[in-house]
Amino acid sequence: MLNTGVVRRIDNLGRIMIPKELRNTFGLDAGQAVQIFTEDDKVIFKKYQFSCVFCGEASGNSMFKGKNVCEQCLHEMRE
């Protein structure tokens, strides 16, 4: 794990600010969804990728009635 040397305090609402340099490096914009994982004593943030609600595929998804669905599952639903 790479130590960035950045230290931030958690505010009274439980928020923490991610430095602009890290947001730019990882392509995180305001409103971007992130997943939060834990591992031992670590908290890990990962850029969230919307995946198909049926098969979990993360690429080529479209919205269908408010849900992410991949092309293959859309094709199967049409049949």
Image: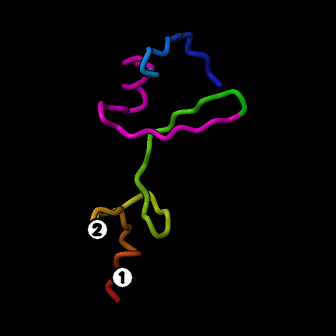
Whether label 2 touches label 1, CB < 8 Å? yes
Circle 2 sits in a helix, a strand or a loop, which is it? strand
As shown in the figure, which amino acid type bears the numbered disc 1?
Answer: Met
Q: Nearer the viewer, residue 12 or 3?
A: 12
Left or right, residue 16 beside residue 65:
right
x 63%, y 36%: residue: 38
Q: Between marks 2 and 1, how big is the CA–CA gap?
A: 11 Å
User: Which image quadrant is residue 24 in?
Assistant: top left
- Asked if residue 14 is positioned above or below residue 7 in the image, the reply reads below
- Whole-percent x, y for residue 68 in the image: 35, 62
- Asked if residue 59 is positioned above or below residue 74 in the image, the reply reads above
Give the number of the disc on residue 77. 1
| Residue underneath mark 2 | 64
- Whole-percent x, y for residue 42 in the image: 65, 28
Q: Residues within 10 Å of mark 1 (few under 14, many from 20)?
A: few
- Asked if residue 32 is positioned above or below residue 57 in the image, the reply reads above
Q: Residues within 10 Å of mark 2 (few under 14, many from 20)?
A: few
Q: Outermost residue toward the bottom?
A: 79
What range of the chain is rendered magenta?
16-39
x 49%, y 68%: residue: 55
Q: How is the image coloured?
A: rainbow
